[in-house]
Image (spheres, coloured by chain):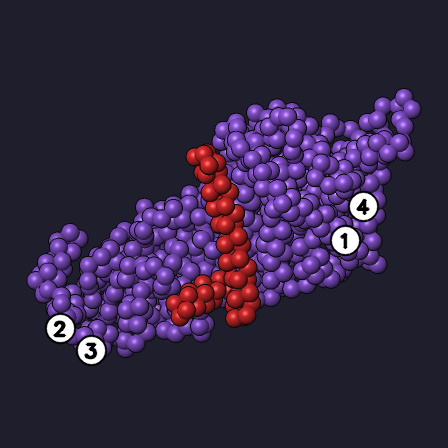
Chain colours: A red, B purple
Amino acid sequence: MTGELLVGVVCVIGAFSAFLLLTFFSLRRVNRIKKKGLTTLREIKRGLARNERTR
Amino acid sequence: MNEPVEPSSHSIKTELSRELSLFHVTMMGVGMMIGAGVFLGTGITIGKAGSGGVLLTFAFNGLIALFTALSYAELSSAIPRAGGAYNYARISYGKGGSFLTGWIEWFASSVAGSIYSVTFATYCIHFLERMGMFKSGGIPPFLFVKVVAVAAALFFVYINYRGASETGLAGSIMTLGQTLTLAFIAMVGFWVVYHDPSRLKNFHPFLPNGWDKVLITMGFTYVAFEGFEVIVQTGDEVIEPRQNLPKAILYSLLIVVSTYLGVAFATVVAVKGVGTEAWQWIGQYGPTGFGEAVARLLPYGSVLVVVAVVFASTSALNATIYSATRVSYALGRDGMLPGIFSRIHPKRKIPNIALLATSVLVTGVVVALPTEDVAASADIMFLLLFFLVNIAVIKIRNEYGDELDYGFVMPFFPILPMVAIVMQIFLAVWLIHMSVTAWIVSGVWLVASFMIFNYYSKARCTDTIFRIVVLEEEKAEAERPYRILLPIANPAHAIQLVGYAVQVAQIKGAEIIFLHMVPIPEQTPLSDAKEYLDVGHEAFIEASLYVPPDIPMSTSIRYCRSVSRGILSAIREHKADLVILGWRGRSFRKDYILGSTLDPIIEKAPCDSIVIRLARFRTIKRILVPVAGGRHGHMALRIGNMFLESPDSRITAFHVLRRGESRERIEKIIEAMISSENLPRGKIDIKIVESERVLATISTEAGQHGLVIIGASPPRFFKQMVFGSLPEAVAQYCETPVMVVKSKKEWRTPLTLFNAISHKKG
């Protein structure tokens, strides 16, 4: 495997993995915000931050 | 919070019906994105960037498109209304910017519809010719293409006319068909490689023309990821929009990026034994390279591709007509275009006149203009649109975030929209080199927007509910360089606060600006505002009785849906140096520390701020200033010095020494603070008490003083506090009058710098 091929494959896999991670992370956010019944920006920020701390 | 209602608009008689499901809108987004781009773009991209380049192009574009998609997801969850980007611009940029955005959006979507109808017609006629079912008979084929394209566009205009449900159903069925076809092609590609791994050699060389070609193909195909625009247009018609719109945007992008990558992989591995490199062989066919490759992968592959193209171009055409219609409807609804655009068919519940105007635009472009250059100008328009949306998401969250109900907020804010902004600038610049005509067409359309706005829309368009209206304003005859803004809600509070403002004004040689925000109910037209002015007038009269004649005094009565935003706007407009706010001593809302009005002002005020727990001003002999260094502590000492009125009054600079702290070090810090502020050392006592119970110790000490002045704590990451926990607790629990001060200089993050720039421009 040449260096160029290796870099290219890593970039494709890396970019697509980052895309998938960010997409699923964001989808999870939508569900959590709905589940917790959060609406205002402050509620969401605090609600999500509290959840992160307790996990 | 209720759905926003225009305060000055007429009552809405007919509304769009809310019947589109998550599946419907997801499919509409997928349909608009896959469109014809993947069929035309894959072959061209492989020819330019190589076998690996096509994968890199789609993977990187998917990631960058996701950043913009998250902006759309956040905004659509907070402002779920037909009009999409136009609505966001209306809130963040005002009338002119929002008209420009809506105008761009209408053009870009309509022209995209024209391109899809031409693509459909081209492939249909090509297919019929190959099957021997069509002969042009000496008539130039492009004329047939135009006729079929117009017929296709009109057919989907009719589908849209049938109503939202049919639009969603027709689009969903076609999109599902095309997506399944492409998924099947991708799976066959993987199956072939599984049985014949030697085909992976087609990826060698991975990037025959280098990385710069990848950047070029990224620009070329980026607009194939713009389907979230149609999803947000369904804001008035989708069920549970605050959750379903962000989900639909994310699901559709997930489907599209995965499909593009799978199809690109299958296209490359489809080629074997052609005598040249695979990427060269596919590239030589250009737009039809994908079809030629798939024909070698599958029996009847070319038929399958034609079927897929028919599905793709028709579903994209359907979605773009829908999207463009909703934008022109929104422009008409807000008075930007003639009101007839906002007329809704009483039976069909669709904006029929807006649909008619869109159909004229789509078919007119099909008939009159060359497709390629117009397509490039649509690219430029979409990039400009996304650029505006990414700025809008930052502005709206910072300035209007407290007034909106969100169903989703994007992670890593504001880094992701900033990256998207940079990338979109880069791609738009690249398109200048691709087509000069495209920039001329775009320029003409932009000039037209300026003319229409200035000669028609400016005088007629309705105000947004977010507008700040100055109802009455009276300026002081002599302006002073230092300005104190004193927002007052009612006459009783005015009397309590004015003494503090006068004290500071006399020492600073300042003028006082009294501000009263009128609480007009949302449904009440602004024309009735005068009925609500009396309280403000009374407060001004009461306050002015306590202001000595040598202090210049201005007054301003304003309306804003959000009092805090109205006050912040007044601070910026009057260039106030200090804002003095009264606090009742409790908050009724769990998500706010001091209250829904005070918290945003203190967080965002571009000037020094003082919050006084409401108590009548009196001459104070002993002032307690708890200090621990820091910018806000300096300000607390400075303000304390201003209130030293009588010769025997004194300040106590107080510190609670905790375990491990050095008394000498704290003494040095306090001494340094006093000398750096040029305060009279003889009037300041330094008192340091050892204790682990900081709040209780300060409260006890406060009992021996007439006023407590405490500086805000430095901001802490991941902790949403207005002043920092200790000052808030002191302000809440001390029985002595408390004043909390915050100096304007904050940490300079990229976001605060951006805010500063945008406020200056605003």
Q: Where is residue B291 in the image (x, y as percent from the top left)?
A: 72, 35
Q: According to the image, label 2 marks what residue?
A: B690
Q: Position of residue B283 (x, y in %)?
A: 64, 28
Check disc 4 and report its element: helix, strand or loop: helix
- As measured in the structure, the alpha-carbon distance from the residue carrying label 4 to the one carrying label 3 is 77 Å
> Which of B597 and B647 lies nearest the eye of the viewer?
B597
- Mark closer to the observer (1, 2): 1
Q: How crowded is the residue under tag 2: few (<14 C-alpha within 10 Å), some, or many (20+)? A: some
Q: According to the image, label 1 marks what residue?
A: B173
- As measured in the structure, the alpha-carbon distance from the residue carrying label 1 to the one carrying label 2 is 75 Å
**Which label was assigned to residue B700?**
3
> Which of B18 and B612 lies nearest the eye of the viewer?
B18
Check disc 1 and report its element: helix, strand or loop: helix
Residue at mark 2: chain: B
Q: According to the image, label 4 marks what residue?
A: B156
Amino acid type at image mark 1 = Ile
- As measured in the structure, the alpha-carbon distance from the residue carrying label 3 to the one carrying label 2 is 13 Å
Amino acid type at image mark 3 = Thr
